[in-house]
Every structure is written in structure tokens, then in C-alpha cells.
Amino acid sequence: MKSLKIVLIHTFLLSALVVLAGCGGSQADKAAASSTSERIKVVATFSILGDLVQNVGGDKIELYTLVGPGSDTHTFEPSPSDSVALVEAKLIFENGLGLETWLDKLYTASGSQAKRVAVTEALKPIAMSKEGHEADGEFDPHVWHDVANMIQEVEVIRDALIAVDPASAKTYQANAEAYLSQLKELEAWVIVEVEKLPEARRKLVTSHDTFGYFARRYGFDVVGSGLGSTTEASDPSAAQLVSLVEEIKGARVPVVFVENVSNSRLMEQIAAEAGVTLGPALYTDALTDPGGDGDTYVKMMRHNVTILVTALSQ
């Protein structure tokens, strides 16, 4: 009988320990789930904008980026998981200025109630032109090549996050302040680097017309591009190709550049026809995959400016 009691006591203690262990695990899981649920869900439309949003949001947000690294926002095709992300989000950060031509349909179809924030609203956009005339209501969306524009966008992102999550206002303010310091340092660096390049050599020919804001801010001349303002455009006609080649020769452009979101074939043809060098790839409309030399906005700009100044100096 005594041995039976001992067995029963041991059984009871083991059962208690199992229950307690189970409770402990459950509490840990609940804590982890609570930590995740406390983060507000945010969507950014493409990788460059996503990098800005993450720098400001930090660990207070759960970020979903629609168009990831190395992908072209101009030709993006949404998936069902993108619709789900929009439904769950509290905020959607978009570039605007006609970059995300697919977003209105995606937003409507998803039934999302998230607040949409166009980060370019306060910027001074460059009007698009067609055959020498301004296109009515159409603007160049590639604002990120001007660091000063991104400084303003960070302030918009900060204010939007504070508006939906005021309890984390101090965190967003501190994150934004730290990141703005990086961007101001970057802006100063770009200006110093560009000054090393004589004005007569600040001439750009790229895959598509993406450097308008860069040219306006830092004193470059966009001689032409293989495509128009979007990578969706068809290859130029024979007559357009001849005209661009003649412009390159007339402007004495030494190098033309390919982009990380475009096929290099067209620019290889243009370089061969014009008898000029094909430069290294520039990161224009998307960041690189993590670990690449353009996996953040700051690194992307440093890469591009270094490539441009070095190649055009030779």
C-alpha cells in the first residue's frame, strides 16, 4: 500500500509539472503574439520607399513591401497575397505621380480600409513632356534620385505613423531624426562628389528617363534615354534610335548606362551604334537584394554617384 501511495504521489507531481510547463510555454507564446500584434501593419509600394518607411517605423511596424528588391514597379502585377496585405494594413505608403498605375484597382478590389499616404504630395514635380510639349497632368515619378526630396518624404512618413499610432510618437520622432541625419550627410556627400566632375561632362544617357530630379538637383543634363519615362515602353523605332545616337555623338557623351530593372540589350546596341562605352549598371527604380551594394537607399545613392562620377570623368 505504501509503495502504491508513492507511485500515486509521483504521478501527481509529474502531471503538475507537465501542466505548469504547458502554461509557461503558453504564456511565452502569448507574449510573443502580443508583441507582434502591437506592431501596426504597414504597406509600402516599392523597395526604395519601403526602406524609408522601415527606418522611421523601426520595430513598431510590421512592413509589407509590394514590389520587392530588383523588381520593376512599372511592370508589377499584384498577387492575391498583396490584396490580403492591403486589407490588414492600417497605412499604405505610395509614391504617387503615376508610378503605381495598378494601385487604385488593387486597393478597390481588396476592399482595404487602410489610409493611403502619397509621400510626394508636398514635392515640386517635374512635368512630363511629349514631343516637346508638357503632357497635361502627367509628372515624372522618379523623385527619389534627389536626396532633398527624400528628406521631405521621411517627414511625411513620420507624421503619418504618429497620426495612427500616437502612443509610439517618441519612437517615430527619434527614428526619423536619426535617419534624417543620415540623409543630410548623404546629400552633402553627393554635392561634394558631383563637384569633382566638370559641368561639361555631366551628361546622362540611361535605359529609361529616370534621372530628371537628379539632373535638376545636381546640375546634370539628360541627353536622352533608350526608352521613355517607363520601362513598359516599346523599344525605339529605327528613326528614334538614329536620332538618339546622333544626340549622343553631338553631345560628346563618353558613356551610356544600363539599369538594374531593365534589359541591357537595348543600351548595348545604342553604345555600339554611338561608338561609346557601356557603363556599369545603376540602381534606379529598385534596391538590390539584401547583402547587395544597393540594398538600402543610402547605399544605392552612393553606388550611383560613385559610378557616374568615375565613368564620366574618364
Image (cartoon, rainbow, N blue to C red):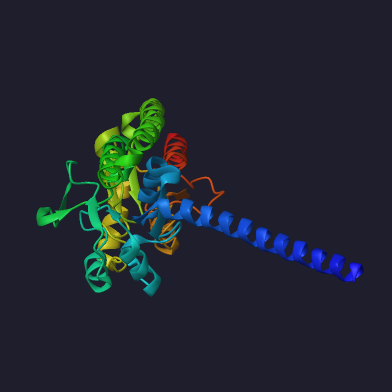
Quadrant position of residue 304: top left
Quadrant position of residue 213: top left
The residue shown at (30%, 60%) is 227
Answer above or below: position of 258 versus 110. Answer: above
- Closest to the observer: 311 or 1? 1
Answer above or below: position of 265 versus 189. Answer: below
Quadrant position of residue 218: top left
Where residue 284 appears, as percent x and y from the top left, is 38, 50
- Closest to the observer: 100 or 208? 100
Where residue 244 appears, as percent x and y from the top left, is 28, 55
The residue shown at (44%, 60%) is 264
Where residue 292 appears, as percent x and y from the top left, is 54, 49
Where residue 75 appears, as percent x and y from the top left, is 34, 67
- In the image, taking residue 71 as reference, residue 120 lies left or right, namely left
Which quarter of the rendering shows the N terminus?
bottom right
- In the image, taking residue 268 as reference, residue 233 lies left or right, namely left
The residue shown at (38%, 36%) is 171
